[in-house]
Amino acid sequence: MASRGAFLAGVHRIFALISVEPALALYIFTSFIKYPVFQALLYEKSCIARYHDAVRCGNTSAVHSDILLQKDANQLFLYSSLCLLLPSIPTALLLGSLSDVWSAKIPILIPLLGLIVGDVNYVVQSTFFNFDARWLLLSDIISGFTGGYAALMGMMFSCSMKQTDPAHRSRRMALLEGSIGIGATLGFALAGLVRESLGFSKTFILLMGLRMICFVYIVAIVNEIKPDKQQQSLNQSLLSRIVRATSRRLAEVYEVVTRSRPSRSVLLLVLVAFAVELLAFAGVNDIQYSFFRFKLKWTDKEYGWYKGLSYAFSTVTVLSIYPWMKNRGVRDMMLCAIALTTKIASLLATAFVFDNWFAYATTPLSALNRFIATSLRATASQTVDVVEQGKVFSVMSLTDGVTSVCGSVIFNSLYPRTLPSLSFLSFVIVAAMLLIPLFISLYLLTERAHTNAAAASNSEILDERKQ
């Protein structure tokens, strides 16, 4: 009976921790189904617009190496990324301010509503293939102006952390990481199978229904968090509070970078490494589907399996190996350097992929990819005071948005120009770019070792003098 009581108490503690995590997992699941399916839809609609032959365009093997079609689809995907990312950067700032001064739930619901409305457009566009493919961008515009992916993720993380006692935040973070990993792995793995079974339009109807469930869950289950009454003083309107909070956030971004502190150089180097890694990630992510389609005749199904396997490896390692190595005293910069080395190897292997089995065999090299951002975020947070933790994460969030735009523009413009003979070039360039954060990681690791050695030497000298 005692053991049963302990088990039930443990289960109760786990459920007590759960807040937005189920909605986060479901949202990630829908997003990672949508990603390869949307790219497949872009190609098919672009092909029909160019050749007016639905049968031929539905056969990937017949058109996979069509360079003009690759250029059409990559250009459209670039426009899609810009329509989503550019408006989402200021909107994310506004939603963050709204979360500070009014409500924690509403800034989650606004991006979700934008996604649901965008899904309606996807259903229409995938039902009527004769409609111009550029109408797909309407969904990205709606999603961008309501915050998009980055804002929704940020608001869910913020809401979850606000409900958590500081002593339990590491457990909460593990739940959030697990939710993302499970949703991403299953979403990618099932994307092609779902699209093959249901077709494009019914797949988007399914995604819309699942996102409605997310919306209802947030409204009905997640606890609301209101700012204290002092923050909501009656002599200030909601609009003025939002404007002040947004201005404060922008000022904090500037302050945390320019403020004179002993660790300022470390913070700036970490931010440079973070920006380059995100630029590389955004670039590869945008062109990877097109690359595998061109090289291996992949559809969204094979690509989904590849990405699902990669995410499965990275989720297992970030939830098990990362904390295990941290508990044994391995430094963040060492973990970052190891992960960057394996990522460079993965990119070079992908660049010269020649068969399906080889592509899938490279996925274990992606197992440590999530160590990079995790280690850099942890190191950045260690360079500032406790009261500046929110500020440094605001800087990193803004960096994420800006570098995503830049990566999308650079690599969606470059990749079509490398076809057909230099299709590997973008991956080699990204691998070379990652040498910058790798050298920064090794430099900071060496500097820390020298600092610790000097401190130990000074301590020994003081001890000798005391004797």
Image (spheres, grey):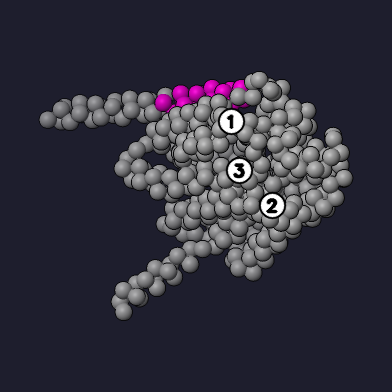
The crowd level at tag 1 (other Cα within 10 Å; few <14, some 14-19, many 20+) is: many
Whether residue 145 appears in this view of the structure is: no
Mark positioned earlier in the residue sequence (1 or 2): 2
Q: CA distance from mark 3 to mark 2?
A: 12 Å
Element at label 3:
helix
Numbered range of the magenta stretch = 425-442
Q: CA distance from mark 1 to mark 2?
A: 29 Å
Quadrant containing the N terminus is: bottom left
Q: Residue at x 61, y 43 (%)?
A: 302
Mark positioned earlier in the residue sequence (3 or 2): 2
Whether residue 455 appears in this view of the structure is: yes
Q: Residue at x 30, y 76 (%)?
A: 2
The label shown at residue 447 is none
Residue 121, how many percent across, how many down? 81, 52
Closer to us: 384 or 141: 141
The residue singled out by tag 2 in the image is 195
Residue extending farthest to the bottom is 1
Amino acid, disc 3: Glu
Closer to us: 314 or 24: 314
Residue 383, how many percent across, how many down? 46, 36
Compared across the picture, whether 447 is left or right of 288 comes to left
Q: Residue at x 86, y 38 (%)?
A: 52
The residue singled out by tag 1 in the image is 280
The label shown at residue 302 is 3
**Circle 3/circle 2 CB separation < 8 Å:** no
Mark positioned earlier in the residue sequence (3 or 1): 1
Residue 434, how many percent across, how many down? 52, 26
Rendering quarter of residue 214 = bottom right
Rendering quarter of residue 159 = bottom right
The crowd level at tag 2 (other Cα within 10 Å; few <14, some 14-19, many 20+) is: many
